[in-house]
């Protein structure tokens, strides 16, 4: 196995271990994060910000995540056989197959999709999409793992197709510098990680 692939797998294991600790704690401990219900923007403002983002990215400056990116991955389980991620305006859209199989597991406490994005400068961003089955609450949360700044949003699945999970989340706190970030998805059920996408390594934005 190549040295780069070994390092990538070690990094994934470290992230997985962190998630396994963080998600169960979220069931009982409040986080005191910012209320971001006032973060709406006009269509004209979004278009302007997207153009500024592209220009800044081309010059190597840190800027918001560019609009118009998309990525696809094949997973390692029928719980998450494939997934798609895209950016539109100031929103990150996430679509994950196998949702009907996940719900059939009948989680006792929670199940969560976790999207990890890595900027070329080394900054990690974590998006948790969690269904706290014990309390009946759902939550979308995005965190900058370098600063621990975090925003929570209500709501969860937007799809009318039982086999597909779909949602979108504001991506204004995700920044990129130069090239596009890479990403990967994981599924955790009652504290146990059960599926990954891609099956190995990271996926690219194009």
Image (spheres, grey):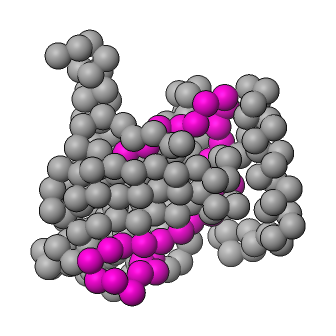
Residue 26 found in image quarter: bottom left
Residue 107 visible in this rendered orientation of the protein = no
Q: Indicate whether 179 appears above or below 164.
A: above
Q: Indicate whether 165 appears above or below 189.
A: below
Residue 39 point in image, percent of width and height: 74, 69
Q: Residue at x 52, y 64 (%)?
A: 93
Classify residue 137 as left or right of residue 6. Answer: right
Q: Indicate whether 88 appears above or below 182.
A: below
**Viewer-closest of 147 and 127:** 127
Q: Residue at x 26, y 77 (%)?
A: 163
- Give the farthest residue toward the top: 3
Residue 38 point in image, percent of width and height: 75, 73
Q: Residue at x 79, y 35 (%)?
A: 56
**Viewer-closest of 72 and 41:** 72
Q: Indicate whether 107 appears above or below 204.
A: below
Residue 87 visible in this rendered orientation of the protein = yes
**Viewer-closest of 84 and 135:** 84
Residue 79 found in image quarter: bottom left
Bounds of the magenta span? 156-184
Q: Is residue 173 magenta?
A: yes
């Amino acid at each position: 196995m190549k040295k780069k692939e070994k390092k990538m797998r070690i990094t994934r294991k470290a992230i997985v271990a962190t998630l396994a600790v963080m998600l169960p704690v979220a069931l009982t401990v409040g986080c005191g994060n910012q209320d971001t219900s006032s973060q709406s923007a006009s269509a004209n403002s979004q278009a302007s910000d997207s153009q500024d983002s592209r220009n800044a990215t081309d010059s190597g400056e840190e800027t918001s995540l560019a609009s118009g990116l998309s990525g696809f991955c094949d997973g390692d389980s029928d719980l998450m056989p494939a997934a798609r991620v895209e950016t539109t305006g100031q929103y990150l859209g996430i679509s994950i197959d196998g949702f009907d199989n996940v719900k059939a597991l009948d989680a006792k406490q929670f199940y969560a999709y976790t999207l990890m994005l890595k900027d070329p400068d080394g900054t990690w961003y974590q998006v948790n999409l969690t269904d706290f089955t014990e309390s009946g609450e759902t939550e979308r949360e995005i965190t900058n793992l370098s600063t621990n700044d975090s925003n929570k949003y209500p709501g969860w699945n937007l799809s009318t197709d039982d086999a597909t999970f779909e949602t979108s989340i504001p991506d204004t706190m995700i920044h990129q510098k130069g090239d596009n970030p890479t990403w990967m998805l994981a599924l955790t059920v009652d504290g146990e990680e059960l599926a990954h996408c891609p099956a190995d390594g990271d996926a690219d934005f194009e």
